[in-house]
Amino acid sequence: MLKEKGYDEFLAEKIRKGREDIQAGRYLTAEQSRQRIEVLLARKEKELAQQQLEQGVIYG
């Protein structure tokens, strides 16, 4: 298998930073992540509906 030069160092740094984040409590559980995504999607859905309504008024 071929790897790019420096990949092992890059990967080791990412793992180190990830472990530091976990130790510092900077992470989300799967449930927290799911809830945030649901809130984001609901907000985006409302924004899209509002844009479509405005376009209908302007061009209708």
Image (tube, grey):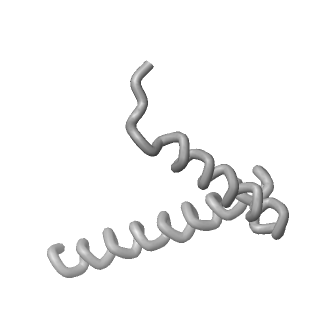
Can you name the residue that lies furthest to the top here? 1
Q: Position of residue 36 (x, y in %)?
A: 67, 64
Instruction: Judge left or right: residue 56 versus residue 8.
Output: left
Instruction: Judge left or right: residue 7 versus residue 37.
Output: left
Front residue of this view, candidates 42 and 23? 23
Indicate the quadrant where residue 51 lies.
bottom left
Instruction: Judge left or right: residue 32 versus residue 14.
Output: right
Residue at screen point 57% across, 66% down: 40
Q: Position of residue 34 (x, y in %)?
A: 70, 54
Q: Quadrant of the N terminus?
A: top left
Indicate the quadrant where residue 22 lies.
bottom right
Residue at screen point 64% across, 59% down: 38
Front residue of this view, candidates 23 and 52? 23
Front residue of this view, candidates 13 and 59? 13
Vertical arrangement, residue 17 with respect to residue 57, above or below: above
Residue at screen point 45% across, 45% down: 6
Residue at screen point 62% across, 48% down: 12
Q: Position of residue 41 (x, y in %)?
A: 55, 61
Q: Quadrant of the C terminus?
A: bottom left
Can you name the residue that lies furthest to the left here? 59
